[in-house]
């Protein structure tokens, strides 16, 4: 028996329902190991096949989705044809309602979303696709190690041609702010606190609001999406919430507050990618 491993094979960007924090954007690295007998090539499995099969399954079933812990008593799910409505209660009687095409959801057979429960679901799905010589498979999910400030955010991009159009997917993201060419950890910490566990919504998608709730709705190429959540978990901007716009929004906000300073904002979208805003 031999073991094959791939570190950092892919990244899963998604949002999920958390019992205390509500709608939470997340980004996890995925490592994999496979154990089995060698095939006729002298391999457990060809590296290219591992990468292709794992990424294809993760992209289809888990990435850029809202992961719902289906066995949680806080979740109520209704399905009608190709659509699903999820009602979730968390914290001190706060609620979230998400209505979308079924393809925007990952219905996890667990009471909560964790590295272990999602890894188990990926493992179960992948084992069905492995050749007979592979006897054991292990998926390991982990967040990026971050020394500085970061925030969890969820959003949806209705004009996106791909899966970013889903109204509640998200990321765990670093923020770096340079004020007059020098990193400013305090400003980074301030913005990370402002956008902790936030839903960043576009003003044109907001259909109703009061001091308790905000409701967003839009039509995209995959169908109609609707999301209602507590107002204090939302942050409104006047554009689509692309990472380019978010970086520029932060830079412009800082410039208004400190007009004599020059800013460069490095806003990440998950792990290892992002955009720069300057003012």
Image (cartoon, rainbow, N blue to C red):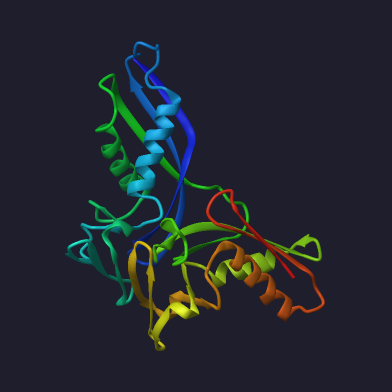
Task: Specify the quadrant that holds the C terminus.
Answer: bottom right
Q: Can residue 74 be seen at all in this image of the molecule?
A: no
Task: Please give the name of the residue rendered at 32% of the width and 15% of the height, measured from the top-left corner.
Answer: 37
- In this rendering, would 254 be left or right of 209? right
Q: Please determine whether, in this image, residue 168 is positioned above or below residue 273.
A: below
- In this rendering, would 204 be left or right of 192? left
Task: Please give the name of the residue rendered at 35% of the width and 51% of the height, measured from the top-left corner.
Answer: 114
Where does the image place residue 232, in percent across and percent down from the top left? 45, 79
Q: Please determine whether, in this image, residue 180 is positioned above or below residue 33.
A: below
Task: Please give the name of the residue rendered at 51% of the width and 67% of the height, measured from the top-left corner.
Answer: 196
Task: Please give the name of the residue rendered at 40% of the width and 30% of the height, measured from the top-left corner.
Answer: 50
Q: Please determine whether, in this image, residue 39 is positioned above or below residue 172.
A: above
In terms of image quadrants, where is residue 1?
Answer: top left
Where does the image place residue 84, in percent across and percent down from the top left? 23, 65
In terms of image quadrants, where is residue 40?
Answer: top left
Q: Can residue 256 be seen at all in this image of the molecule?
A: yes
User: How many numbered dots are placed on residues in this image?
Assistant: 0
Where does the image place residue 148, in percent across and percent down from the top left? 63, 56
| Of 79 and 37, the residue lying toward us | 79
């Amino acid at each position: 028996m031999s073991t094959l491993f791939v570190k950092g094979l892919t990244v899963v960007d998604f949002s999920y329902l958390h019992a205390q924090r509500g709608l939470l954007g997340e980004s996890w690295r995925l490592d994999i190991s496979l154990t089995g007998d060698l095939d006729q090539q002298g391999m457990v499995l060809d590296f290219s096949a591992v990468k292709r099969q794992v990424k294809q399954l993760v992209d289809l079933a888990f990435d850029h989705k809202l992961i719902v812990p289906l066995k949680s008593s806080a979740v109520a799910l209704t399905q009608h044809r190709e659509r699903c409505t999820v009602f979730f209660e968390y914290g001190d009687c706060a609620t979230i309602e998400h209505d979308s095409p079924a393809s925007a959801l990952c219905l996890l057979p667990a009471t909560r979303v964790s590295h272990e429960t999602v890894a188990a679901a990926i493992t179960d799905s992948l084992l069905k696709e492995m050749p007979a010589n592979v006897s054991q498979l292990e998926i390991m999910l982990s967040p990026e190690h971050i020394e500085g400030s970061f925030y969890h955010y969820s959003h949806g991009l209705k004009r996106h041609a791909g899966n970013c159009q889903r109204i509640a997917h998200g990321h765990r993201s670093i923020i770096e702010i340079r004020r007059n060419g020098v990193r400013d950890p305090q400003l980074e910490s301030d913005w990370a606190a402002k956008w902790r566990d936030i839903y960043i919504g576009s003003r044109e998608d907001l259909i109703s609001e009061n001091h308790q709730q905000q409701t967003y709705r839009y039509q995209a190429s995959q169908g109609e999406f609707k999301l209602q959540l507590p107002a204090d978990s939302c942050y409104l901007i006047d554009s689509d919430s692309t990472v380019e716009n978010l970086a520029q929004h932060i830079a412009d906000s800082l410039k208004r507050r400190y007009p004599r300073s020059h800013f460069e904002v490095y806003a990440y979208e998950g792990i290892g990618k992002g955009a720069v805003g300057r003012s």
